[in-house]
Amino acid sequence: MADLIHADTTRSHLSMRPITLWRRLLAEFLGTALLVTAVVGSGIMAVRLSPDDVGLQLLENSVATAFALGALILTFGPASGAHFNPVVSAADWLLGRRTGTGLTIGDLCGYAVAQTLGAIAGSVLANLMYGLAPVTLSTKDRAAGNLWLGEVVATTGLLLLIFALGRSGRAAVAPAAVGAYIGAAYWFTSSTSFANPAVTVGRAFTDTFAGIAPASVPGFVGFQLVGLFVGVGLLLALYPDAGRSPDDIVVEHPAANS
């Protein structure tokens, strides 16, 4: 029994050791890459399985994405917090400025670069798995005011959900909650809820169901940033102490150690 207690104590101690920056960046790269692989790959499979039914294609794509996102948060959350999204990381930094917590500006830049490179790699991987050229720039135009509004709504709602969970100590349910929100937002937003600048950039590298034309990327990213500021403003109004536990905004993980 003493050995078991010692082993449990050792595991607990090890689990609370700070995660170095390079490991967190690797987790963000891999998590975002696999997320985009799931989005793009399931989109390609949906078109092949249901070529004449766009509604069914979207259902297949959204369900696969929601489940994959939940699984990836569980997988990489203990290492990096499973942001997979520069907007989430930026909100963490912005809210943390008031309390001296959250990501540093250096960490934020590193996260954003790792997430964006991971998203591009994810599109390339999905293309290769389905026998396509590694890079096939999308021709799907998504530039319209109603779509940009959809991105503001999707991004704002995502931030409100994540930080409300962190503030209330319910980060453990984030994998299911965030996956469910993104799966639902595929359907209730006009833009099918990209809500992520890195993923938006990555999806420009595939001319498939989930793609977005490179010319449409700046508009989507710009209004996702609008959603960032709207979301942060609402969080400060609703939860003035939202920045006090930013390390747990997606899932609980050991404190950062650069």
Image: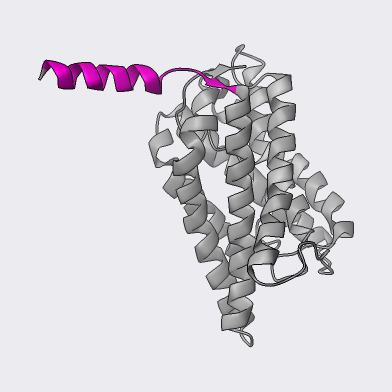
Find the residue positioned furthest to the left. Answer: 1
Note whether 132 is above or below 212 in the view shown: below
Q: Is residue 146 left or right of residue 36?
A: right
Q: Residue at x 49, y 43 (%)?
A: 73
Find the residue positioned furthest to the top. Answer: 100
Visible residue check, residue 229? no
Which range is magenta?
2-20
- x, y (%) of residue 98? 64, 14
Note whether 187 is above or below 237 in the view shown: below
Note whether 18 is above or below 114 in the view shown: above
- x, y (%) of residue 203? 74, 58
Q: Is residue 198 left or right of residue 98?
A: right
Q: Residue at x 63, y 49 (%)?
A: 33
- x, y (%) of residue 251? 46, 34
How many discs mark residues in the rendered view? 0
Main secondary structure along the magenta-highlighted residues: helix
The reply to whether the magenta stretch includes residue 94 is: no
Q: Nearer the viewer, residue 105 or 14?
A: 14
Q: Nearer the viewer, residue 185 or 39?
A: 39
Visible residue check, residue 90? yes
Q: Residue at x 50, y 18 (%)?
A: 18
The reply to whether the magenta stretch includes residue 16 is: yes
Colour theme: one colour
